[in-house]
Amino acid sequence: MAFSRTLWKVNWHRSMFDESHFDKLHEECGVFAIHGHPEAANLAYLGLYALQHRGQESAGIVSSDGREAYCHKSMGHVADIFTPEVLGRLLGDHAIGHTRYATAGDTVLLNAQPFSVACNKGKVAVAHNGNITNASELRRELEREGSIFQASSDTEVILHLVARSRERTLAGALREALLQLEGAFSLVFLAGDRVIVARDPHGFRPLAFGQMEMSGGKSCYVFASETCAFDLINAVYLGDVEPGEMIIVGKDGMTRERYAPVRDRAQCVFEHVYFSRPDSMVFGRAVQESREYLGRLLAQEHPVDADIIVPVPDSGTAAALGYSAESGIRFGQALIRNHYVGRTFIEPSQAIRDFGVKLKLNPVRHLLEGKRVILVDDSLVRGTTSRKIVRMVRNAGAREVHLRISCPPTVSPCFYGVDTPSIAELIAANSTVEQIRRFVEADTLGYLSLPSLREAVADKNHDYCYACYTGNYPTELVNIKQLMEAKENRG
Ligand code: AMP
């Protein structure tokens, strides 16, 4: 029900967290699964390729021929990791895959997914998108009882819970394990000739399923964080794995069951604001549609007389188009993005201010010179990038720079899988809009309101999580300080 839900307001105080704690608190990821296709690993590779934007640190695929499991995971980008030789070794008709964003460090490859385990329920591999908020407590309990962990990721906890379960079947053990988890999880499992997927009862992170035609009139099932993965492999989007639902695909077809009681939905609104690709359907809604609508509503709420609307590419493009359509002011791509900026680039040794942003973006002078510019971006987090971009536009000759942000001020960190910095670094948590305007050196600054954000994603039933804009968390965050510290120590 709309307003009967329990929201847990966290009253932040600085001493509770110092910066570094939050830096470890994110698992931005993409997951993929396919059952019953002779080219399972190749298709998982293509699926991950389409989901690359959800995580660029490491990627992995586990395939299975029903008896043996085959695994390859490595640091880096999907296209570099999976050579034809590697894919040739990933045998079998079933596969799951994962692409992960993580902080740097020695232990990172150990944290690359999928994770695999051989236990009394057979061989099980898992890939996870989201953050389990009670993982450190569960882990401590498991360690007390003798479990040995190899990685610092939340996900390993799930496999230990499955392995330890007294339930005799894998499905039973999974049900028991999932019910002990709190927070955000969209999971894909591979066990012999079965693919099993599940979503947390609030449905924080997306997980779509689709069907793919094969030769001989047969078809197979596929699952992915976003539907752009289906488009690449010519699969048809059928719907979403429901919050609190587990789907098992085996040789006898698909079975769907609710493993957890119905809870209030809390779908991540940031998927629509920034994270997902605009060509995806997420939570049953076209992301591009939401983004253009965000821009239209932004133009209604924060109009300003100007000559040109310029998106910060690529994140602000759809909202800028919406702003332009609503205001009638021309849209111009006056910031050009270099898409080939790699992490191997070495900066010259002398300090060059703003080098990072210059590598990525370059202004088109003749579009900006003497112009009153509306600069549109999807979000403003620390404010440091935005300041550099505002300066860049002004240095290219703009007469006025009006910054418009297509979401409300980000005031609270995410505990459910989005990379947000510490409360101390979130500029809107510590400053007024006027102070932020001065910091980013814009002539005016306008954020979209929360009601308009809700309208843009068509959230009539309060199905979304807005915690990063409100500080109202849809789940109780038990022992959050310890959780942070545990992550810090492990990370
Ligand atoms: P800043 O001005 O430093 O706050 O940076 C704002 C930019 O960061 C915007 O262009 C956003 O699209 C981008 N951004 C926001 N959230 C994230 C995130 N979780 N991961 C990566 N980039 C983000």
Image (cartoon, grey):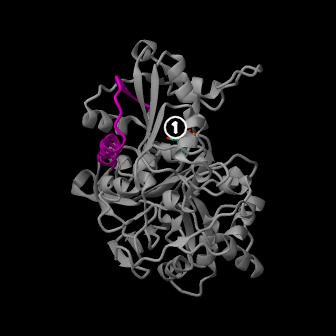
The residue at 42%/74% (across/down) is 244
Question: Residue 260 appears at what percent x and percent y?
Answer: 44, 80
- Does the magenta portion include 169? no
For the C terminus, the image quarter is: bottom right
Identify the image quadrant of residue 210.
bottom left
The residue at 42%/48% (across/down) is 273
For the N terminus, the image quarter is: bottom left
To which residue does mark 1 refer?
A: 79
Question: Residue 332 appears at what percent x and percent y?
Answer: 35, 23
Q: Report the amino acid beneath label 1.
A: Ala
- Does the magenta portion include 306? yes
Identify the image quadrant of residue 13.
bottom right
Vertical position of residue 64 compared to residue 272: above or below: below
Q: Quadrant of ligand 1?
A: top right
| Residue 367 falls left or right of residue 289 | right
Vertical position of residue 255 compared to residue 458: above or below: below
Q: In terms of depth relative to the viewer, which is nearer, 482 or 64?
A: 482
- What range of the chain is rendered magenta? 287-313
Question: Residue 385 appears at what percent x and percent y?
Answer: 58, 35
The residue at 57%/36% (across/down) is 438
The outermost residue toward the front is 434
The residue at 44%/74% (across/down) is 201
Question: Residue 9 appears at what percent x and percent y?
Answer: 55, 70
Q: Secondary structure at mark 1?
A: helix
The outermost residue toward the left is 217
Q: In terms of depth relative to the viewer, which is nearer, 42 or 145?
A: 145
Q: Does any portion of residue 40 appear in the rendered image?
A: no
